[in-house]
């Protein structure tokens, strides 16, 4: 956190590790602002919101409309998601809420235009921000427009997913956006739920570290997970059990980022993605699955149960 003049401060980061050169990191600043608001909300501490409002003023200074085109659609969507989430946690009648609303109105319009211009545009942060805005919108016309955007995000995901090789790739990022999209009822959402659950399960199976710490005789016979095996026995011994349960990226993403390391965001993205998937499941109608050996009892009660189901109109229901 460094001053930029006029009493304003911004979060900065080194342009490269060990360079000693720092530059403004607007996504980092937005994330820090969101974190402060979340803490203030949890602790009911007004001073936290005052700090967040001051930091937001710095964002408006450091990220004017003339700079928006410098960032990718996804990067701008990350910022928008942070601002929308902040707006859900502050008083709607506060000056902070008014400032956010004014900024978000223009920022959202800019992103929606970019989304419409490029059929390849997609962002899990943009998807989540769109759903959050749709859920809170009261004006019928605007809500309908946002609903159309959600449907378009869902349609584009169905087109993009095959090219991403989602059955073997780390998809905790997309999970964060696809799960919220399915909160909007519809045929498309119903069809995607099962594939979403498979993706979440795959991310846990392939990319979560699970291994027996060196010297743990009780768990010595436990085979390491695929992710742990990729790191190698030497590194696992060095780490001990400290990173058990953490997540790592896939080989392709490591190569693209020119690293072979474990970062905190590798795990954070999966925690958020899986959490949103579980939240989606809580909104779905549960279906009771008969246990093995219970078929006979179910058959005996079939007529009564079937009649009850037909009378009630109940139907069974079934991201990344």
Image (cartoon, rainbow, N blue to C red):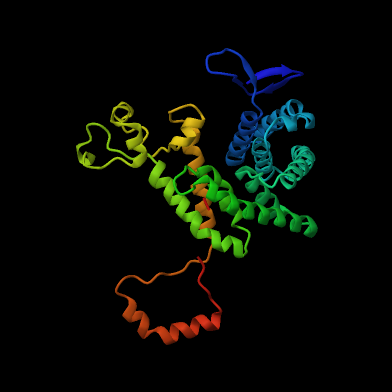
Q: Residue at x 50, y 71 (%)?
A: 316
Q: Quadrant of the N terminus?
A: top right
Q: Nearer the viewer, residue 285 or 68?
A: 68
Q: Residue at x 60, y 45 (%)?
A: 124
**From the viewer's perspective, is residue 314 above or below residue 146?**
below
**From the viewer's perspective, is residue 210 above or below residue 71?**
below
Image position of 41 (left or right of 257): right
Quadrant of residue 210 within the rendered picture: top left
Q: Position of residue 100 (x, y in %)?
A: 75, 39
Q: Nearer the viewer, residue 117 or 104?
A: 117
Q: Position of residue 146 (x, y in %)?
A: 72, 54
Number of on-image labels: 0
Q: Residue at x 50, y 80 (%)?
A: 309
Image position of 313 (left or right of 140): left
Q: Position of residue 306 (x, y in %)?
A: 46, 83
Q: Position of residue 42 (x, y in %)?
A: 58, 41
Quadrant of residue 297 within the rendered picture: bottom left
**From the viewer's perspective, is residue 137 above or below residue 26?**
below
Q: Nearer the viewer, residue 172 or 43?
A: 172
**Which residue lies most toward the top here?**
20
């Amino acid at each position: 956190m460094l001053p930029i003049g006029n009493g304003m401060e911004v979060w900065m980061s080194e342009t490269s590790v060990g360079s000693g050169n720092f530059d403004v990191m607007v996504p980092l600043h937005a994330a820090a602002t969101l974190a402060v608001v979340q803490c203030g909300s949890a602790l009911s501490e007004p001073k936290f919101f005052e700090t967040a409002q001051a930091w937001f003023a710095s964002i408006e200074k450091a990220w004017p409309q003339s700079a928006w085109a410098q960032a990718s659609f996804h990067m701008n969507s990350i910022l928008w998601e942070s601002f929308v989430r902040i707006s859900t946690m502050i008083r709607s009648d506060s000056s902070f809420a008014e400032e956010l609303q004014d900024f978000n109105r223009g920022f959202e319009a800019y992103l929606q235009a970019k989304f419409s211009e490029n059929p390849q545009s997609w962002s899990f942060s943009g998807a989540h921000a769109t759903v959050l805005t749709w859920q809170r919108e009261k004006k019928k016309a605007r809500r309908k427009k946002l609903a159309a955007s959600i449907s378009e995000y869902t349609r584009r995901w169905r087109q993009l997913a095959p090219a991403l090789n989602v059955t073997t790739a780390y998809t905790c990022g997309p999970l964060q956006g696809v799960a919220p999209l399915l909160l909007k009822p519809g045929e498309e959402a119903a069809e995607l739920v099962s594939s979403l659950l498979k993706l979440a399960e795959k991310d846990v199976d392939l990319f979560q570290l699970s291994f027996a710490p060196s010297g743990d005789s009780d768990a010595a016979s436990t085979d390491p997970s695929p992710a742990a095996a990729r790191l190698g026995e030497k590194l696992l011994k060095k780490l001990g059990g400290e990173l058990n349960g953490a997540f790592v990226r896939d080989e392709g993403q490591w190569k693209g980022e020119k690293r072979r390391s474990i970062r905190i965001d590798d795990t954070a993205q999966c925690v958020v993605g899986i959490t949103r998937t579980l939240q989606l499941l809580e909104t779905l109608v549960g279906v009771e699955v008969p246990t093995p050996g219970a078929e006979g009892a179910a058959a005996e009660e079939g007529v009564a149960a079937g009649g009850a189901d037909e009378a009630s109109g109940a139907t069974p229901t079934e991201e990344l």
